[in-house]
Image (cartoon, helix red, strand yellow):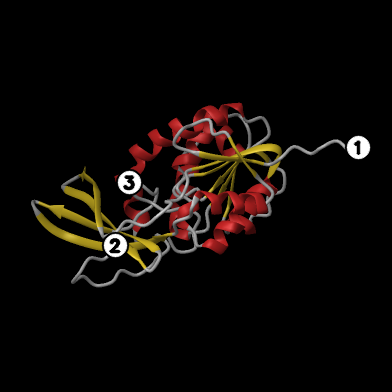
């Protein structure tokens, strides 16, 4: 998923349908195509998942929350509605951040006052001990290894001692062949019907996610567009090693679909 901190789709949270035999190879992008379709096709499922994953933990936050890879702001909105603390939304992709800012503009004054949007990558946000909760929804598997390691370090720096990072784990292995995933949509908008076909394909150690978007009117395709993203598998032992090296430690997750890491509490001097 380019150099962003998050990716869309039915399994990842941002888009992609991988190339199949005989099709033009998709080009990696930064959501310039997908941002237009993302909320229409994925908002309902993403919002339900965000509430299931993060609402309870957000309600326990007492200092602040960081949303790494905020995308169009669906998770950010859930974090704001579930808590009373400042929320930092980190989103490097301009196309996704544009939607995030439009969503922020529609918030009530109290929630807008608690939201700060950071336009760079995780390590560029400069957040130091601002939060007791950080989340990374559909992010860890969607950034290249160097950026993933930078994300762990940024999370360790942003959390206060004892603070918790929640994330969905990356895939541990590649499929043996190309796989079609459940389509997104169709969703009706006026006279148009919008959908995305999604495929994932193993490609030299990387999982290619390709989203083929289609708009139909009266049964006829009037628009089509494609955007592709990459995911990097990571074995659990390697993930644990990276987390530890960054100054975090794996922790018990409050939700079975998530993994968790915690910044260790400072020990009192002997």
Q: Please name the residue that numbered disc 2 is placed on.
A: 18
Tag 3: Cα neighbours inside 10 Å, few (<14), some, or many (≥20)?
some
Which of the two discs, 1 and 2, labels the residue nearer the N terminus?
Answer: 2
Q: Which mark is nearer the camera, 1 or 2?
A: 1
Q: Which mark is nearer the camera, 1 or 3?
A: 1
Element under disc 2: loop
Quadrant in which the C terminus is drawn: top right
Q: Please name the residue that numbered disc 1 is placed on.
A: 270
Extreme-right residue of the structure: 270
**Disc 1 vs disc 3: Cβ atoms closer than 8 Å?**
no
Where does residue 83 sit, x and y in percent of width and height? 57, 29
Residue 32 visible, this orientation:
no
Residue 35 is labelled as none
Query: What is the C-alpha distance between the residues marked 3 and 2?
Result: 14 Å
Q: Residue at x 67, y 48 (%)?
A: 156
Residue 200 visible, this orientation:
yes
- Left/right placement of residue 43 relative to residue 154 reads left
Residue 10 is labelled as 3
Extreme-left residue of the structure: 219
């Amino acid at each position: 998923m380019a150099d962003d901190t998050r990716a869309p789709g039915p399994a990842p949270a941002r888009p992609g349908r991988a190339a199949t035999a005989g099709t033009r190879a998709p080009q990696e992008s930064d959501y310039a195509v997908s941002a237009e379709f993302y909320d229409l096709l994925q908002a309902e499922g993403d919002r339900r998942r965000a509430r299931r994953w993060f609402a309870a933990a957000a309600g326990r936050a007492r200092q602040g929350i960081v949303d790494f890879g905020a995308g169009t702001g669906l998770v950010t909105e859930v974090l704001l509605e579930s808590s009373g603390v400042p929320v930092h939304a980190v989103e490097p992709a301009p196309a996704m951040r544009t939607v995030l800012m439009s969503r922020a503009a529609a918030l009530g004054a109290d929630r807008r006052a608690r939201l700060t949007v950071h336009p760079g990558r995780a390590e560029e946000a400069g957040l130091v001990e601002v939060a007791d909760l950080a989340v990374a929804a559909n992010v860890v598997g969607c950034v290249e290894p160097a950026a993933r390691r930078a994300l762990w370090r940024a999370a360790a720096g942003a959390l206060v001692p004892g603070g918790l990072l929640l994330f969905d784990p990356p895939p541990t292995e590649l499929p043996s062949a190309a796989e079609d995933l459940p389509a997104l949509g169709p969703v009706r908008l006026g006279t148009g019907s919008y959908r995305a076909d999604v495929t994932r394909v193993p490609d030299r150690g990387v999982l290619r996610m390709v989203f083929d978007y289609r708009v139909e009117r009266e049964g006829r395709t009037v628009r089509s567009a494609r955007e592709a993203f990459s995911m990097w598998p990571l074995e659990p032992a390697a993930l644990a090693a990276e987390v530890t090296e960054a100054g975090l430690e794996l922790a018990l997750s409050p939700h079975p679909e998530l993994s968790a890491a915690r910044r260790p509490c400072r020990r009192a001097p002997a």
